[in-house]
Amino acid sequence: MVDAVLGNHDYRGDAEAQLSPVLREIDSRWLCLRSFIVDSELVEIFFVDTTPFVDEYFTEPPEHKYDWRGIGPQKSYISNLLKDLELALRGSTAKWRIVVGHHAIRSVGHHGDTQELINRLLPILQANNVHFYMNGHDHCLEHISDTESPIQFLTSGAGSKAWRGDIEGMNRRGVNFFYDGQGFMSVKLTQTDATIEFYDVFGNVLHRLTSSKQLHSSM
């Protein structure tokens, strides 16, 4: 199964094409919606459409034209999205709760923290016992711990072009791991434990996060 969530470059093209049900007719493993939930009982994964949160995308120069069909007005769209997410999180009985968005909440990579997500999305995650927030956007690998809750921020955006030496984020609180080369992340979950590993392109483990219902550790 391939579960995808829209990013800023998807919105710069034809966003509706990315969401077309025709794609599932071509390959039934494909699923891309604006926001949706994947429930496997052990884990619930909440996919969130983060691009409309970013205010600068609505004011960028004309050469970056965004496809906002189905979004406007922005404030109402975000308000409804957050309301639906909060209700779903409150009702979740899964052992693990993971939220996935394209943009980072916390990052020391090229784009740094996304302040709009810190202001609007993060408080809901903190209040509803979310274990992990996973994202792409920055072309790097990162593990950052929230300083106000058990949430772990995990960036895996290094599957293609990597930005060597591009470290812009000034907020270094909670940073456990940062890698500016190409690589990927794997996630293994059981009823009691989570193991998340970051790899380089040669398959070497660069960083490992282990988490249980009681403890967190990284190495």
Image (spheres, grey):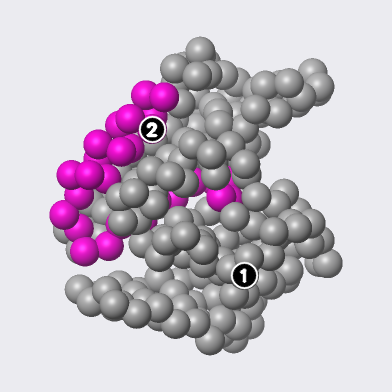
Give the left or right position of residue 164, taking residue 192 as reference: right
- Residue 70 within the magenta-colored segment of the rendering: no
Residue 211 pos. (x, y %): 36, 77
- Label 1's element? strand
The N terminus - image quarter: bottom left
Q: Is residue 51 above or below residue 150?
A: above
Residue at 30% across / 32% down in the picture? 84
Residue at 22% across / 44% down in the picture? 90
Of callouts 1 and 2, which one flags the residue occurring earlier in the amino acid sequence? Answer: 2
Provide the residue designation for mark 1. 175
Residue 153 pos. (x, y %): 51, 61
Residue at 59% across / 75% down in the picture? 176
Q: Quadrant of residue 144?
A: bottom right
Q: Is residue 5 above or below residue 205?
A: above
Neighbor class of circle 2 (other Cα within 10 Å; few <14, some 14-19, many 20+) is: some
Report if residue 76 is visible in the image: yes
Q: Is residue 57 above or below residue 194?
A: above
Residue 142 pos. (x, y %): 60, 67
- Residue 92 within the magenta-colored segment of the rendering: yes
Q: Magenta part of the protein: which range? A: 79-105
Q: Quadrant of residue 163?
A: bottom right
Provide the residue designation for mark 2. 82
Residue 204 pos. (x, y %): 59, 86
Disc number placed over residue 152 in the picture, else none = none
Question: Looking at numbered disc 2 in the image, what kind of residue is underneath it?
Answer: Leu
